[in-house]
């Protein structure tokens, strides 16, 4: 995914769904980001999420981000899976 460094906070970077085939509490999922990054996850609907920017980005400081999303179910024991998304920043002429 590419994103302009001029994108304001709360810009949607990616949309994704998480599905667990279990029923009841074992089928409910949550998502979180691993590590500190200028992004956050927003719940849109049941099992539908958006990765959005949480602050202003600067390509001169960081050119790309490896954003790891971890999905976890509410079963016992809880099971999880992770996926890493590459987000590249596009340069905007600062002059």
Image (cartoon, rainbow, N blue to C red):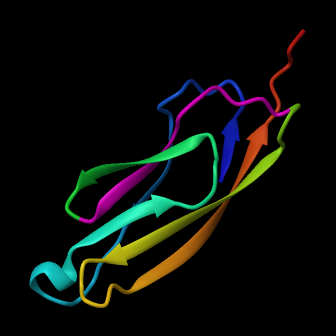
Question: For residue 29, what is the image quadrant?
Answer: bottom left
Q: In which quadrant will I find the N terminus?
A: bottom right
> How far across and down, in percent of the image, does residue 4 sit?
69, 33
> How far across and down, in percent of the image, does residue 54 sit?
53, 34
Q: Is residue 1 left or right of residue 26?
A: right
Q: Residue at x 27, y 83 (%)?
A: 20
Residue sitting nearer the eye, 14 or 32? 32
Give the vertical position of 59 relative to 68 (above or below). above
Q: Which residues are magenta?
A: 47-59
Q: Is residue 70 left or right of residue 19?
A: right
Q: Residue at x 49, y 70 (%)?
A: 70
Q: In which quadrant will I find the C terminus?
A: top right
Q: Residue at x 63, y 56 (%)?
A: 35
Q: Is residue 15 left or right of residue 90?
A: left
Residue 54 magenta-highlighted: yes
> How far across and down, in percent of the image, does residue 83 sit?
56, 73
Question: For residue 61, what is the image quadrant?
Answer: top right
Residue sitting nearer the eye, 33 or 3? 33
> How far across and down, in percent of the image, does residue 89 sit?
75, 41
Give the vertical position of 58 relative to 93 (above or below). below
Q: Is residue 27 left or right of residue 61?
A: left
Q: Residue at x 88, y 31 (%)?
A: 60
> Residue most toward the front?
77
Residue 78 magenta-highlighted: no
Q: How many marks?
A: 0
> Residue most toward the left?
24
Give the vertical position of 89 relative to 69 (above or below). above
């Amino acid at each position: 995914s590419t994103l302009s460094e001029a994108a304001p906070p709360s810009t949607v970077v990616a949309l994704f769904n998480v599905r667990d085939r279990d029923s009841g509490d074992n089928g409910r999922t949550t998502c979180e980001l691993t590590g500190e990054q200028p992004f956050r996850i927003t719940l849109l609907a049941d099992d539908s999420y958006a990765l959005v920017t949480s602050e202003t980005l600067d390509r001169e400081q960081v050119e790309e981000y490896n954003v790891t999303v971890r999905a976890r179910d509410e079963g016992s024991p809880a099971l999880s899976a992770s996926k890493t998304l590459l987000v590249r920043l596009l340069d905007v002429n600062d002059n």
